[in-house]
C-alpha cells in the first residue's frame, strides 16, 4: 500500500510534535479527502441532468414521498437539512425549469406546497438511477463484508458526533 497525503502529513507532525498523538488525522483526514473526491464524482452525475446538489436533493425528497409527490417548503427544508430561505431559491429555479409546481395547500389555505411535475418526476427517476449506479461504482473497491462493516462503524460514529452537536 502506498503512502498517501495524510500519512505524509502525519509523519511530518510526528517529527515536529512527538508529544501529540496525531492518529485521529488518519481517519478524519482521509474521510475529509474522500468526502471531497466523492462529492466531485457525485456532482458530475448531477450536472449531466443540469442539476445542482440542492435541486437534486429537493427533487429526490419530493419523489421519495410517493404520490402525489409534494411537500410544504418547511418540510422540504427538514428533509434536505437547509434553511427555508435556501429552499425557496431552489424551488424558484425548479419551478422556472418546469420540474415542480407550487400551489396552495388543501390542508392550510394560506400555506403552499411544492409538487413534482411529470417532467420533474421523469428527470429525477433518470438522474437517481444514474446516481445510484455511480455510487455502486464508487464503492466497488470494497467487498460486501467491508461495506457492511464500514457502514456500521460510520453509523456509530455519526450518531455520537450528531448527539454531541445537539447537546
Image (tube, helix red, strand yellow):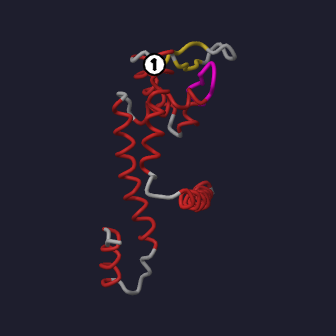
Query: Quadrant location of residue 72?
Result: top right
**Residue 97 image point, x, y percent:** 39, 18
Q: Measuring 36% from the left and 45% from the top, which residue is drawn there? A: 41
**Residue 74 image point, x, y percent:** 58, 30
Q: Measuring 57% from the left and 60% from the top, which residue is drawn there? A: 145
* Picture quarter with the N terminus: bottom left
Above or below residue 68? Residue 47 is below
* Front-lying residue, 125 or 68: 125
Query: Quadrant location of residue 2?
Result: bottom left
Left/right of residue 46 with respect to residue 73 in the rendered view: left
* Picture quarter with the C terminus: bottom right
* Front-lying residue, 6 or 135: 135
* Front-lying residue, 81 or 147: 147
**Residue 16 image point, x, y percent:** 30, 83
Left/right of residue 28 with respect to residue 75 in the rendered view: left
Q: Measuring 39% from the left and 50% from the top, which residue is drawn there? A: 38
Query: Quadrant location of residue 111?
Result: top right
User: How many numbered discs?
Assistant: 1
Left/right of residue 30 with respect to residue 167 in the rendered view: left
Residues in magenta, as a range: 65-75
Q: Is residue 58 magenta?
A: no
Q: Measuring 40% from the left and 16% from the top, which residue is drawn there? A: 96
Query: Label 1, on which residue?
Result: 99
Amino acid at each position: 500500500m502506498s503512502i498517501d497525503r495524510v500519512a505524509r502529513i502525519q509523519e511530518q507532525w510526528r517529527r515536529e510534535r512527538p508529544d501529540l498523538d496525531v492518529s485521529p488525522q488518519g481517519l478524519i483526514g482521509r474521510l475529509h479527502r474522500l468526502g471531497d473526491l466523492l462529492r466531485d464524482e457525485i456532482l458530475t452525475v448531477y450536472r449531466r441532468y443540469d442539476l445542482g446538489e440542492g435541486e437534486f436533493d429537493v427533487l429526490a425528497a419530493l419523489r421519495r414521498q410517493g404520490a402525489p409527490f409534494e411537500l410544504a417548503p418547511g418540510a422540504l427544508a427538514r428533509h434536505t437539512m437547509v434553511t427555508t430561505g435556501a429552499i425557496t431559491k431552489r424551488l424558484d429555479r425548479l419551478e422556472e425549469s418546469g420540474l415542480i409546481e407550487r400551489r396552495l395547500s388543501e390542508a392550510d389555505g394560506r400555506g403552499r406546497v411544492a409538487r413534482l411535475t411529470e417532467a420533474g418526476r421523469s428527470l429525477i427517476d433518470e438522474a437517481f438511477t444514474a446516481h445510484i449506479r455511480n455510487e455502486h461504482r464508487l464503492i466497488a473497491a470494497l467487498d460486501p463484508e467491508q461495506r457492511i462493516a464500514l457502514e456500521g462503524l460510520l453509523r456509530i460514529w455519526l450518531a455520537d458526533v450528531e448527539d454531541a452537536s445537539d447537546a
